[in-house]
Image (cartoon, coloured by chain):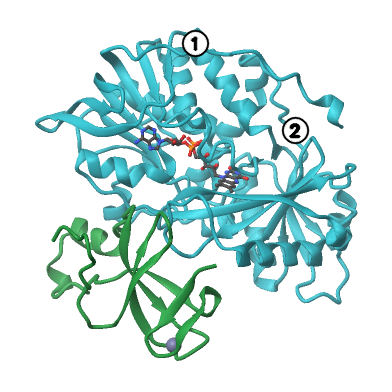
Chain colours: A green, B cyan
Amino acid sequence: MILISCPDCGARDETEFHYGGQAHVPYPEDPSTLSDEEWGRYLFYRENTKGIFAERWVHSSGCRKWFNVLRDTVTYRIAAVYRNGEPRPTLDGDSQ
Amino acid sequence: MADLLPEHPDFLWRNPEPKSSYDVVIIGGGGHGLATAYYLAKNHGITNVAVLERGWLAGGNMARNTTIIRSNYLWDESAAIYEHSLKQWEVLPDELDYDFLFSQRGVLNLAHTLQDVRDSVRRCEANRLNGVDAEWLDADQVKEVCPIINTSDDIRYPVLGATYQPRAGIAKHDHVAWAFARKADELGVDLIQDCEVTGIVKDGNRVVGVQTSRGTISAGKVALCAAGHSSVLAEMAGFDLPIQSHPLQALVSELHQPVHPTVVMSNHVHVYVSQAHKGELVMGAGVDAYNGYGQRGGFHVIEEQMAAAVELFPIFARAHLLRTWGGIVDVTPDASPVVSKTPIDQLYVNCGWGTGGFKGTPGAGWTMAHTIAHDEPHEYNAPFALERFSTGALIDEHGAAAVAH
Ligand SMILES: Cc1cc2nc3c(=O)[nH]c(=O)nc-3n(C[C@H](O)[C@H](O)[C@H](O)COP(=O)(O)OP(=O)(O)OC[C@H]3O[C@@H](n4cnc5c(N)ncnc54)[C@H](O)[C@@H]3O)c2cc1C
Ligand SMILES: [Zn+2]
């Protein structure tokens, strides 16, 4: 079980949360102009990063707010937690 | 029971040095890569083939799964490929000359709610129309097939009935891998372990080889059979897959006398249970929620599946947990696999079998070999192409697959 620090409630067990997959996936600005391929990509394709991954969690049994987490998908270690709407934080050692 | 186990075999394949070039390079030495190599050689006469495995053969999901084999999926496309697979399971012990303990002890998929009952009856009817053996059993009939199940009506989710596929069963997964490996090796395939693919070499839009931890190997065609790592390899090749990799865990109890005669699965209370030939109770459930490449997951998932198992099988209450482990499963949006050509010429992909690809091992190998040999899909895998994620022709098997398979 991983320990997740909700930005509002602090550190709680993973079982209090639900997972939301990849973060920062915007809804297409003008869906009706998308081709079938582009719409299919929006619906069905998400990054499947091995390493640091920006992902969404919701504190379902707590404040019920969504927020974002940078987590290593190999070690499962959480590197950063940040609020919805905030940009992805830069980590030490990030290449960008 | 223990005396039924075969002797530990001698070395079953050569361990050759990689050659500088092959007609076909298969990435991933799990069940699917090995079966693909075997059927390339046997069905298509293509033997200048290497299987490259970064660890050891079957060290991925192949020898971590709970070995359930069945073909009772809902849609026609699934029935065709899974039933073809089951028919191969029925002949493979002879064909591969290897008794890998394929035991057709049947599978019960339990229904606990009225909606479960309706969906299950519908699935039975669909199965029968597709020539897949399936029966609907009421709670008393369930108890006849599996006397240790609690069918009383005073539990939280009483058993209202089950679908029953008598030809379903289990097999010894590591032996299945060795059986395919030995035959593929005999037919001339090079099985190369400790050889990690680190890059895909292209000439324009055409694949021409792979970079590996043991040097560059050129290839006429390349097949990805990397299960949980499929996205990583696709990225090396320059295309994307609609796959998310998740941890999937399983567990075994200590050894017991035979008490459990069949395989029982419950989507609703989230557990499935069989008893291995040696006597361990083998259990699994659903994936851990988050993406993960760590081959391990959270203990709460194990705890929940054991709670469900004890509710269904009160006599397991004092069985001890011996061991838990995890694999990395490659999950698609429609819980159906991808066996397909790719946007790169002469590069093929078999993945997305997620929690249920052990049963599909022969079918995946058969159709993948055909696709590689002809540069065209076999009729059984044509519906499982990547294009379905833009045409919308999904093959939604969440109902038949939900707990994991
Ligand atoms: C706990 C668990 C229970 C399961 N239970 C069932 C079940 O009851 N019934 C069922 O039908 N299915 C089940 N499955 C699913 C089934 O195990 C998989 O769908 C199936 O094994 C996948 O095909 P494979 O055997 O080829 O995969 P794997 O054995 O995972 O093979 C992929 C191989 O690719 C190798 N590889 C990855 N990257 C590289 C690289 N860069 N270079 C070289 N090699 C590489 C890996 O090391 C690995 O050996 C279960 C899975 C798990 C984890
Ligand atoms: Zn909170």
Q: Residue at x 26, y 14 (%)?
A: B21
Q: Residue at x 68, y 62 (%)?
A: B305
Counting from the top left corner in percent of width and height, residue A83 is at: 29, 83
What number of labels is visible? 2
Q: Quadrant of residue B237?
A: top left
Q: Quadrant of residue B33?
A: top left
Instruction: Residue at the far front: name it.
Output: A92
Q: Which residue is mark 1?
A: B14
Looking at the image, is B313 positioned above or below residue B145? below
Counting from the top left corner in percent of width and height, residue B38 is at: 48, 18
Alpha carbons under labels 1 and 2: distance apart: 29 Å
Would you say A82 lies left or right of B54 here?
A: left
Badge 2 marks a residue whose secondary structure is: loop
Numbered disc in front, either 1 or 2: 1
For mark 2, name the chain: B
Badge 1 marks a residue whose secondary structure is: loop
Residue B364 visible to the viewer: yes
User: For this rendering, which residue is in front, B246 or B297?
Assistant: B297
Q: Residue at x 45, y 83 (%)?
A: A59
Three-letter code, disc 1: Arg
User: For this rendering, which residue is in front, B30 or B157?
Assistant: B30
Q: Earlier in the sequence, mark 1 or mark 2?
A: 1
Quadrant showing the N terminus of chain B: top right
Q: Which residue is mark 2?
A: B103
